[in-house]
Image: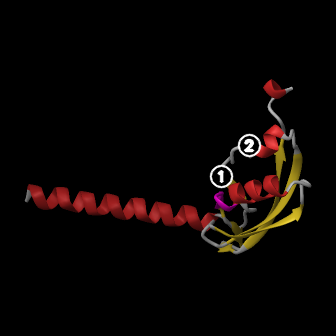
């Protein structure tokens, strides 16, 4: 009898926690796409020695699960290697997907990577 009683408590606690999680998910009606982590690429060695700096604007496409599905350079830094490395870094971002009417959707955002030489090189 004691084993049965403990099992019933565990089952009820599981049901409570599952229903609590479900109710929390339903409360989010809308949310903008949000980056939660991105890979910071190393400064390309040749660009560093050539003292190249610049900003790269990249269009990032994200699916309903928060996974990057594509990238495109919209505005170049003027240096192809800096553009490639920035794009590589953004391909490895993780996102909280955009939510519309309580449903996660595919979306896009533009992100800018700023390449600046370290102060120690000046």
Q: How many marks?
A: 2
Residue at point 53% right, 65% down?
23
**Can you give x and y, in whole percent of width and height, for residue 76 in the image?**
89, 59
Residue at point 80% right, 40% down?
48
Q: Determine which residue is flagged by label 2.
A: 45
Crowd tier of the residue under label 1, counting other residues whose Cα lies within 10 Å: few below 14, some 14–19, many 20 or above: few
Crowd tier of the residue under label 2, counting other residues whose Cα lies within 10 Å: few below 14, some 14–19, many 20 or above: few
Q: Determine which residue is flagged by label 1.
A: 36
**Of 3 and 42, the residue lying toward us:** 42
**Of 111 and 46, the residue lying toward us:** 46
Q: Is residue 103 left or right of residue 19?
A: right
Residue at point 88% right, 50% down?
55
SS of the residue at dot 1?
strand
**Can you give x and y, in whole percent of width and height, for residue 31 in the image?**
73, 62
**Can you give x and y, in whole percent of width and height, for residue 9 in the image?**
25, 57
Residue at point 42% right, 64% down?
18
Above or below, 51 against 68 in this view is: above
SS of the residue at dot 2?
helix
Range shown magenta: 91-95
Q: Quadrant of residue 67?
A: bottom right
**Distance of label 2 from label 1 (alpha carbons):** 28 Å
Instruction: Tell me, yes or no, whether the highlighted magenta stretch contains residue 93.
Output: yes
Instruction: Tell me, yes or no, whether the highlighted magenta stretch contains residue 58.
Output: no
> Is the N terminus in the top left, top right, bottom left or bottom right quadrant?
bottom left
């Amino acid at each position: 009898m004691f084993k049965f009683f403990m099992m019933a408590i565990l089952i009820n606690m599981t049901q409570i926690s599952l229903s609590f999680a479900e109710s929390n998910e339903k409360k989010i009606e809308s949310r903008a796409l949000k980056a939660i982590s991105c890979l910071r690429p190393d400064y390309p060695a040749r660009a560093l020695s050539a003292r190249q700096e610049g900003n790269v604007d990249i269009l990032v496409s994200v699916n309903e699960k928060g996974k990057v599905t594509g990238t495109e350079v919209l505005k170049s830094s003027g240096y192809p290697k800096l553009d490639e490395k920035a794009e590589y870094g953004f391909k490895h971002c993780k996102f909280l997907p955009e939510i519309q009417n309580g449903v996660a959707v595919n979306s896009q955002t533009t992100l800018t990577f700023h390449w600046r030489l370290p102060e120690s090189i000046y």
